[in-house]
Amino acid sequence: METLNQTITKWVIDPAHSEIQFKVKHLMITTVTGSFTSYEADVETAGDDFATAKILVKINTSSVTTGSDQRDGHIKSPDFFDPEKYPVMTFKSTAIKKVDEKGSYEMAGDLTIKDITKPIRLAVEYSGKMKDPWGSMKAGFLISGKINRGNWNLSWNAALESGGVLVSDEVRIVCEVQLAKQA
């Protein structure tokens, strides 16, 4: 049972040691990976207990990159993220449940893209805590899940002659996150 006087610990994402990525099928035969290069996350925990975490992530939609300038331009158009109109997407946690004693959690939250907010669930694997050589406490996590991009009006597609579509509706989310404890 938590005490009312438990210390609130603040954490921030370390962007130099974190990755926020998504993966989609192209032509239904290969996977294309996209990344965001500009984001921030504020995390508050009761003490150092991540099961109590309150998380708010803000991602700059214009920072999307897939390794192809042409594809990136299309992803930044109104067909997809439209960063001129919707510069930020957010994720706000609503619940975190410990799945086992090995560091597995299930995190529920609200994902907002293009001013549309929908609940999602993500699997979280806690990698542990460690002090870096400069004395800062860090914590590592692998976060994964799947969403249907159409739920956020990211529904552009093209039908293929052979059947199927150019881009899968399913988007896999894969994040490697290192948090830094704030003094």
Image: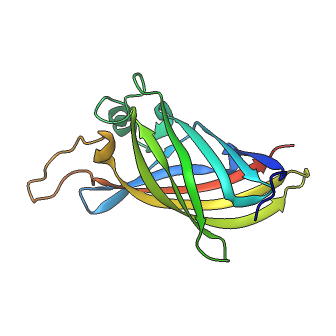
Residue positioned 76% across, 54% down in the render: 46
Return the residue nearer the eye: 7 or 132.
Answer: 7
In this view, the residue farthest toward the left is 161
- Reply above or below: 17 against 38: below
Residue 18 in the image: above or below residue 142: above
Q: How is the image coloured?
A: rainbow
- Residue 69 lies left or right of residue 94; in this view the side is left
Q: Is residue 83 above or below residue 48?
A: above
Q: Quadrant of residue 74?
A: top left
| Foreground residue among 112 and 39 | 112
Q: Quadrant of the N terminus?
A: bottom right
Res. 69 image quadrant: top left
- Expressed as whole percent of the image width and height from the top left, the position of residue 123 reads 52, 64
Percent across and percent down for residue 44 are 72, 47
> What residue do we see at 62% from left, 47% from top?
55
Tell which of 33 and 5 is nearer to you: 5
**Residue shown at 34% from the left, 39% from the top:** 71
Give the residue displayed 50% in from the left and 59% down from the top: 122
Identify the residue at the far bottom of this view.
101
Residue 143 image offset from top left, x and y in percent: 56, 59
Q: Is residue 125 above or below residue 152?
A: below
How far across and down, in percent of the image, does residue 156 sit?
Answer: 23, 40
User: Residue reaching furthest top?
Assistant: 84
82 sits left or right of 160 in the view: right
Would you say 119 lies left or right of 170 here? right
State the quadrant of the C terminus. Answer: top right
Tag count: 0
Q: Is 27 positioned to the left or the right of 83 in the image?
A: left
